[in-house]
Amino acid sequence: METFELRYFLVAAELQSVNKAADRLVISPPAISRAIKRLEDELGVKLFERIGRNISLSQYGKQLQKEVSRIIGDIDDLKTQFKPTDYHLGISIIGTEFSLSSFVPDIIKKLDSKRLQLSLDLKMGQTSKDIERAVLDGEAHLGLITKAPSSSFKKIKLGEYFSKTYVGEGHPLYKYAKKELSVDVHEVLKFEFASFFESVFNQESSAPSADGWRDDKFKRKIALKSESVEAVLKLVEAGRYLSYLPTALEKGRDFLPLITSGCPYKCETEVFLIADRKSNFGWLNSLF
């Protein structure tokens, strides 16, 4: 088997489509299909099952995906050791939209010291469990999660983020935020909130809500839930809803933090960078 065939297989496995893999690799779909067929003939197993126009990994395909991800990673790592400035290193990172946008710049900064030319592939994940599984299965080199991982992973704490209640102009409580006056939490609870589904922040804490608010102690009127961070931010700016948001989202927005009294809880969420403990790439070890 050839290295290029293994690379073609990995892309097709990730996208679950020969046509999409061909578009990404800028080659013809038949070239992808022939490479997969040669691998199947050589290994004597079926790597994919066809589902309509798409394909799905067989049990043998899933096993091969894990092994090939490590093999290709070792090859890429070897090349970077000899010609770090001449070789593009492809690194895949999985996390939520918020964690990727907030913490990937820190990861790039850490890798800059290796003088590598990076090609990043950012993947959207759901829960911490989903992200951990993707890293162990070889679908991504690195993962961003908001809980301490198991012993199967290398880990470092990248940082943390804090959340506050925000209000936009036009909302009845905006005048208090503008004057930096506190509002009792029970008064705040009279108004509707916009919140999120679990997948947005990958929130893992004692708070029984996706955004970290203690709804078990101070029950809100959640009028809207969204998977889109931008949609919620726009609605808060318009003064339509209150929302409990990470402070990192405040910059450049037309809403203000609302000082709330009578609530003893503060939302601080740690963010961890993880990798499979079995991975031993030189560039990866420099992060951990």
Image: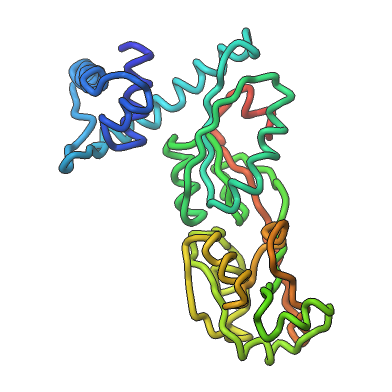
* Residue at 47% across, 67% down: 226
- Decide: is 242 above or below 56: below
Give whichever of 180, 130 is nearer the camera.
Answer: 180
Residue 256: x and y, percent? 73, 70
Q: Position of residue 230 (x, y in %)?
A: 55, 59
Q: Residue at x 71, y 87 (%)?
A: 185
Q: Which residue is painted at 67% across and 59% down in the image?
A: 249
Residue 94 in view (yes/no): yes
Residue plotted at (18% across, 37% down): 49
Q: Nearer the viewer, residue 188 or 175?
A: 175
Instruction: Please say if 225 is above or below 101.
Output: below
Q: Is residue 141 above or below residue 159?
A: above
Determine whether, in the image, residue 252 is placed left or right of residue 129: right
Q: Quadrant of the C terminus?
A: top right
The quadrant of the picture occupied by the N terminus is: top left
Residue 17 in picture, x, y percent from top left: 27, 35
Q: Nearer the viewer, residue 229 or 110?
A: 229
Picture quadrant where residue 113 is located: top right
Q: Residue placed farthest to the top in the image?
A: 82
